[in-house]
């Protein structure tokens, strides 16, 4: 266990940040999975719009890099285009 006040605070902060990041990544993964499970083009387009919004939020919060979000968006768009 840490013995310095600063180390204790750092542990507290990192634990809080880990919980926050974990919740946001879970939200992102669920949105991506929903798009991948879409069977029709209309359903895919609807879920793709939601997934784009969530990816933008997660990127703005600094949880994933903007290029990572862009790559995920393009992959999802290709997937939905193949449904047609």
Image (spheres, helix red, strand yellow):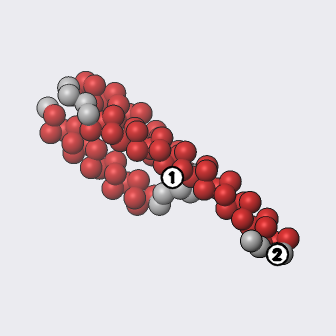
* Residue 49 appears left or right of 19: left
Q: Position of residue 45 (x, y in %)?
A: 29, 30
Q: Position of residue 24 (x, y in %)?
A: 53, 46
Image vertical order of residue 79 relative to residue 46, above or below? below
Residue shown at 48%/57% (left/top)? 64
Q: Quadrant of residue 46?
A: top left
The N terminus sits in image quarter: bottom right
Residue located beneath label 1 in the image: 59
Answer with mark 2 or mark 1, whichever residue precedes in sequence: 2
Residue shown at 48%/48% (left/top)? 25
- Tag of residue 3: 2
Q: Front-most of 67 and 36?
A: 36
Kind of element beneath mark 1? helix
Q: Position of residue 51 (x, y in %)?
A: 40, 38
From the viewer's perspective, is the residue at label 2 or at label 1 nearer?
2
The C terminus sits in image quarter: top left
Q: Residues within 10 Å of mark 2 (few under 14, many from 20)?
A: few
* Residue 34 appears left or right of 27: left
- Tag of residue 22: none
Label 2 to label 1: alpha-carbon separation: 35 Å
Q: Quadrant of residue 4?
A: bottom right
Q: Name, please, the residue furthest toward the front.
A: 1
Q: Position of residue 56 (x, y in %)?
A: 48, 46
Q: Quadrant of residue 68?
A: bottom left
Would you say the residues marked 2 and 1 are in contact, meaning their CB atoms lie under 8 Å apart?
no
* Residue 50 appears left or right of 22: left
């Amino acid at each position: 266990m840490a013995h310095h006040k600063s180390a204790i605070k750092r542990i507290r902060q990192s634990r809080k940040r880990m919980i926050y990041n974990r919740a946001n990544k879970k939200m992102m993964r669920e949105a991506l999975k929903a798009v991948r499970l879409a069977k029709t083009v209309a359903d895919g387009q609807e879920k793709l719009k939601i997934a784009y919004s969530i990816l933008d939020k997660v990127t703005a919060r600094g949880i994933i890099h903007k290029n990572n979000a862009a790559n995920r968006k393009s992959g999802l768009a290709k997937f939905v285009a193949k449904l047609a």
